[in-house]
Image: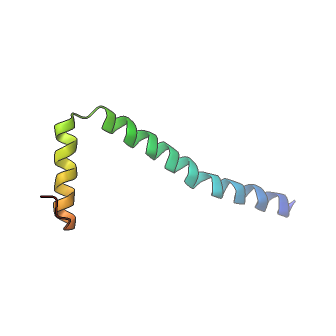
Amino acid sequence: MTTLTKTRALSRSRFAPALFAAILGVAVISLTGHVQAAALHDAAHDVRHATGFPCH
């Protein structure tokens, strides 16, 4: 019985990160799909400057 319990716990621990990544991905795609193009461009532009990438 101990082996069966450990196997179920292991499969759940492997499934949780994949489920979280899928939910996060759908949320990001959904949210960016509803943002105006100018706002999304400005946010990406500010991040590029903050991380030190040249963009001009």
- Left or right of 27: which side holds 4? right
Q: Residue furthest front?
A: 56
| Image quarter in which the N terminus is found | bottom right
Q: Residue furthest right?
A: 1
Residue at horizontal 71%, vertical 55%?
11
Q: Quadrant of residue 27?
A: top left
Residue at horizontal 20%, vertical 65%?
53
Residue 13 location, x and y as percent? 64, 58
Residue at horizontal 63%, vertical 52%?
15
The one nearer the camera, 28 or 5, is 28
Residue 32 location, x and y as percent? 31, 38
**Residue 25 vertical position relative to residue 36 in the rendered view, above or below:** below
The one nearer the camera, 56 or 5, is 56
The one nearer the camera, 28 or 53, is 53
**Chosen colour scheme:** rainbow
Residue 6 location, x and y as percent? 77, 62
Residue at horizontal 18%, vertical 53%?
45
| Image quarter in which the C terminus is found | bottom left
- Left or right of 19: which side holds 41? left
- Left or right of 8: which side holds 30? left
Q: Residue furthest left?
A: 56
The one nearer the camera, 33 or 6, is 33
Give the number of callouts.
0
Residue 50 location, x and y as percent? 18, 63
